[in-house]
Amino acid sequence: MSVVITGTVALDHVKTPQAYQENLLGGSASYASLAAAVFAQPVHLVGIIGKDFPEEHLAMLQTRGVSVDGVERSEGDSFTWSGEYFTDMNQRTTHKVAVNVLENWVPKVAGSAAEAKIAVLANMSPDNQLQTVEQCASATFVAADTMDLWIEIANERLHEVLKKIDLLVINDGEAKEFAGTTNLVEAGRKLQAKGPRFVVVKRGEHGSFLFGEKDEDFFACSAFPLSSVFDPTGAGDTFLGGVAGWLSANGKTEPTFEDLKTAVAHGSVLASFTCEAFSTHRLQQVTAADVAERLAVLRSYTAF
């Protein structure tokens, strides 16, 4: 089985209370692809980079089972994000976003990538997400992430996306904003009514809620507890990629609610590794066995 993941491939400049680093590998599709590759290979990454993008980032992705054949090279500058975290790692300030090569980009899904049964529309503009869906005719399961920016400036197009996907993944604040309610359970159900069969509301360090098609199809998954967080950038993208990768690795190309419960638990645990170091530095070392070991611990923490 294979997975195709479309989204941003970026350069991040990140400051935390512990340190500051520039030109880190970032972008929604980068994290999601690495995460998916922990469970399933090949993972087809579709994105665009500029002339300033370090080759070592691409080389690392390839060594982890991510195909970069779908990564377009441009003579412009790469998409970059600069941000800072504070003592409360739930608080983040974006200092600068340089769209650069993303401004006029149109995703191109070709070859074996277009034959993937699972497609992930990582966080990017709804226009790019719709362009991706149109090229993934073989996909039997499509998952998408979004953010507050698109809810605010591209709401109509985002509603079109929801009609074409099977799973929406969204964080708690954005779910409330998009659904127009302060209740997370109501928000999940309202978003589900807009089109996707399944909805996951990410709750950061508090885990996530999964909503299925039946009223009783509800699953609350705990996050893996960490005594310290170094850099939470990309944790949500890691979660989404982990869900898709686990489904692909286990042949769940038309997953049931029970399948997604297991996939969500794996994605949640995998995301915890991302928070332990800058960028993808920890994620790129993780194996499926590492995830299984931490998942067993989480199960012991939450069983009663």
Image (spheres, rainbow, N blue to C red):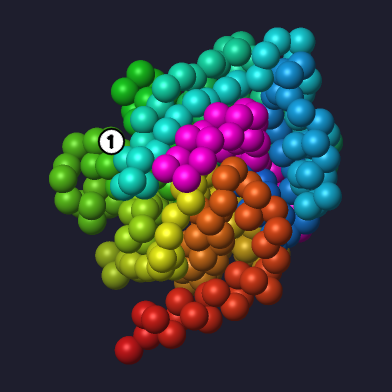
Q: In the picture, which quadrant includes the C terminus?
A: bottom left
From the viewer's perspective, is 46 left or right of 178? right
From the viewer's perspective, is 125 left or right of 46? left
Against 304, is 72 above or below?
above
Q: In the picture, which quadrant includes the N terminus?
A: bottom right
Against 182, is 6 above or below?
above
* Residue sitting at x 51%, y 70%: 262
Q: Amino acid at mark 1?
A: Phe
Front residue of this view, candidates 133 and 179: 179
Binning the other alpha carbons within 10 Å of mark 1 as few (below 14), some (14 to 19) or many (20 upward) gives many
Residue 196 percent location from the top left of the image = 42, 46
Which span of residues is magenta-colored? 1-30
Residue 16 within the segment the image draws in magenta: yes
Residue 263 percent location from the top left of the image = 54, 65
**What element does badge 1 sit on?**
helix
Residue 197 percent location from the top left of the image = 42, 52
**Residue 6 can be seen in this image:** no
Front residue of this view, candidates 3 and 77: 77
* Residue sitting at x 29%, y 51%: 188
Residue 299 percent location from the top left of the image = 45, 81
Residue that protrudes farthest toward the front in the picture: 18
**Residue 84 can be seen in this image:** yes
Q: Which residue is mark 1?
A: 178
Against 158, is 85 above or below?
below
Rendering quarter of residue 298 = bottom left
* Residue sitting at x 45%, y 40%: 16
Residue that protrudes farthest toward the left in the picture: 182
